[in-house]
Image (tube, rainbow, N blue to C red):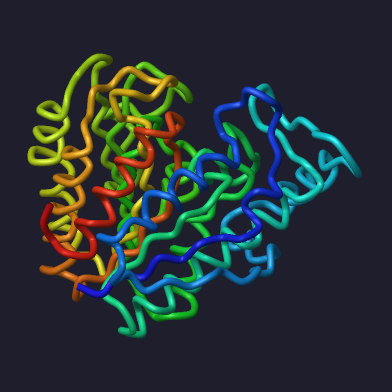
Amino acid sequence: MTTLLVSQPKAASHITPQGHPERPERLTAVADALAQPQFSQLRRETASTADLSLGTLVHDKSVLNSIQMARPAEGIGQIDGDTFVSPGSLDAAGTALGAAMRALEAVVMGEVDNAFCAIRPPGHHAEAKRPMGFCLLNTIAITARLAQQMHGAERIAIVDFDVHHGNGTQDIFYNDKSVFYASSHQMPLFPGTGARNETGVGNIFNAPLNANSSGEEMRQAYNDLILPALNNFAPDLILLSAGFDAHKRDPLANLNWTNNDFGWVTGKLMDAADKHCENRIVSLLEGGYDLEGLAGGVSTHVQMLERGTL
């Protein structure tokens, strides 16, 4: 496999209050992990800045307006109880989208088999009409629409293994049969969505997991629900909301995944990509707030993308 790593130089310009879990050091930890010798064969590129007006592919125009209005000339502004914006936040969001767009282009054009984007802020909580939950714009949802409108992909699958349910992605595609959305997540937990009976138009597959459960329960959920549904959908492209906050070290949740669990789920999704869409996977970083757990999870995820084995 040929794997592309797209990094985001302006990520650190999105500043959150001291002590906030979604902080610039997250990407430093990821960069350090992927700088190790075992990743010497990764193709590496730096993201350019995308036009944020592309957000209107999935968001109401009021979303970008609300971010701009909350953005201060200096210091830190607040959108909701845990979502903040600083003077450089839109620059960070622009390069996050730019990273996703470059990864998408490289994968669909056959330059690489798959790609991982080390980006922040995360995006999967941003709904059609509001930013929330650390998220400003829903980068993966925009990427899905770009895949359809710019690259001719008709059937897009989004699989989300962040420990928090991607309410924003579900909200945006809830009535769209062309986009498959599946999520494994702890429940109950923020944002409170993601029950099994939230099924959209037959395109939404939620696998809530109990607090303190381990990788064994996760594997059962994927084997019983998510993977059969994904194979039945037969996507043209698989996008991953790759959150690493299901790691047992993470401070914001109570699942007990290990690094190998992230490797297992990555491998299973690669099997589906091999079967249906010529290995095309684009993975975008979402959550993961313990730096050691984040680094370990990302390392295992990218190793599996690159080599297909641990």
Q: Quadrant of the N terminus?
A: bottom left
On the picture, is 59 further left or further right than 123? right
Farthest-out residue, right: 73
Examine the rendered structure and indicate whether residue 215 appears above or below residue 253: below
On the picture, is 274 further left or further right than 20? left
Instruction: Say which residue appears at 43% left-offset and 43% top-offset.
Output: 170
Among the 4 quarters of the image, the one containing residue 19: top right
Front residue (pair 157, 283): 283
Front residue (pair 68, 48): 48
User: Residue 289 in the image: x percent, y percent?
Assistant: 46, 31
User: Residue 215 in the image: x percent, y percent?
Assistant: 15, 29
Instruction: Say which residue appears at 50% left-offset and 48% top-offset.
Output: 172
Among the 4 quarters of the image, the one containing residue 47: bottom right
On the picture, is 213 further left or further right than 69? left
Examine the rendered structure and indicate whether residue 146 appears above or below residue 238: below
Instruction: Say which residue appears at 91% left-offset and 44% top-offset.
Output: 73
User: Residue 238 in the image: x percent, y percent?
Assistant: 29, 62
Instruction: Say which residue appears at 29% left-offset and 65% top-offset.
Output: 281
User: Residue 136 in the image: x percent, y percent?
Assistant: 64, 44
Among the 4 quarters of the image, the one containing residue 222: top left
On the picture, is 73 further left or further right than 282? right
Total numbered labels placed on residues in the image: 0
